[in-house]
Image (cartoon, rainbow, N blue to C red):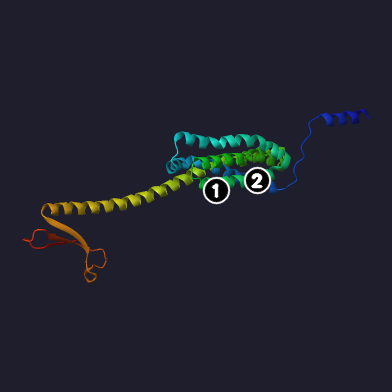
Amino acid sequence: MAGTSAQSAKGATGPQQAPSPTRGSFRWVVIFLLFYITVANYIDRSAIAFAIGDIKAELGLGPTEIGLILGAFGLGYAVTTFLGGIAVDRWGARAVLLVAAVAWTGSIGVTGFAGGFLTLYIARTVLGVAEGPNFPALTGAVSRWLAPHERAIALGNTLVAVPLALAIGALAAVEENEEAATHGDGEQQEGSEGHECDLVEFQVSQAMQHRGLQCVRKKQPEQEQHQDGNAHEIEMQENSPSHGDLRLTE
């Protein structure tokens, strides 16, 4: 009896082992889903850092307004990171992540339609509020689905999403900027060629006016055009009646 009582007392006061979850390999599917949602979470929050220059120019924002917009995310994030842990303990990681993901998706959509400082500020604040519960929910899900000796590995596999998401966002921004630069260079080159043509015509016109001539551009008659249809004729008619007509063909 005494030995039984001692063992009972030891079992009551000693550390109790958490029961190992009997969920099979599906627990690693859960870890992959947590990894995936964290990648989306960090791309959404960091994307503005790569686009802030264009946003500033397009919306005409000053340095103070840019600082407020970038700080708005942190204000909302601080509140719901604290409250998110309470929500996860009460309602579970799945419900909290579902609501959070819907909310931050909506805020990112509104960000794309922002037409001024106030709309963009509100969208960034809502994004911070929506993304705050991500890490409390992630930790809660890992604690629920995995045994204690697997939780560190699971957290490491999930949190690698953070630097990976930042790298993906940077690469996407670089590619988009290169496409925009290429498009802009093409337009600039076309405009430069057109400007050069106009400059040559202006110089020719000025030279002929100095000599008392008049420069008129006209299209050739349809039957006289070249195959490419781009030939033009510059007709120079002398202002003075004592001189004959002059004609210069391109």
Q: In the shown orientation, is residue 55 left or right of residue 12?
A: left
Q: Please, what is the three-letter code of the amino acid marked with disc 2? A: Val
Q: In the shown orientation, is residue 195 left or right of residue 152?
A: left
Residue placed farthest to the right in the image? 1
* Residue 14 figure quarter: top right
Q: In the shown orientation, is residue 61 left or right of residue 98?
A: left
Q: Secondary structure at mark 1?
A: helix
Tag 1 residue: 109
Residue 82 at x, y percent in the picture: 65, 34
Residue placed farthest to the left in the image? 242
**CB-based contact (under 8 Å), mark 1 and mark 2:** no
Residue 240 at x, y percent in the picture: 8, 58
Q: Secondary structure at mark 2?
A: helix
Residue 138 seen from this side: yes
Residue 100 at x, y percent in the picture: 63, 44
Residue placed farthest to the bottom in the image? 223
* Residue 61 figure quarter: top left
Tag 2 residue: 99
* Quarter of the rendering occupied by the N terminus: top right
Residue positioned 17% across, 54% down in the render: 205
Residue positioned 44% across, 40% down in the render: 56
Q: Is residue 130 above or below residue 245?
A: above
Q: Dot 2: within a 10 Å radius of its alpha carbon, few (fewer than 14), some, or many (20 or more) residues? A: few
Residue 52 at x, y percent in the picture: 47, 40
Residue positioned 38% across, 51% down in the render: 183
Q: Dot 1: within a 10 Å radius of its alpha carbon, few (fewer than 14), some, or many (20 or more) residues? A: few
Question: Which of the two labelled residues, at mark 1 and mark 2, occupies the earlier sequence position?
Answer: 2
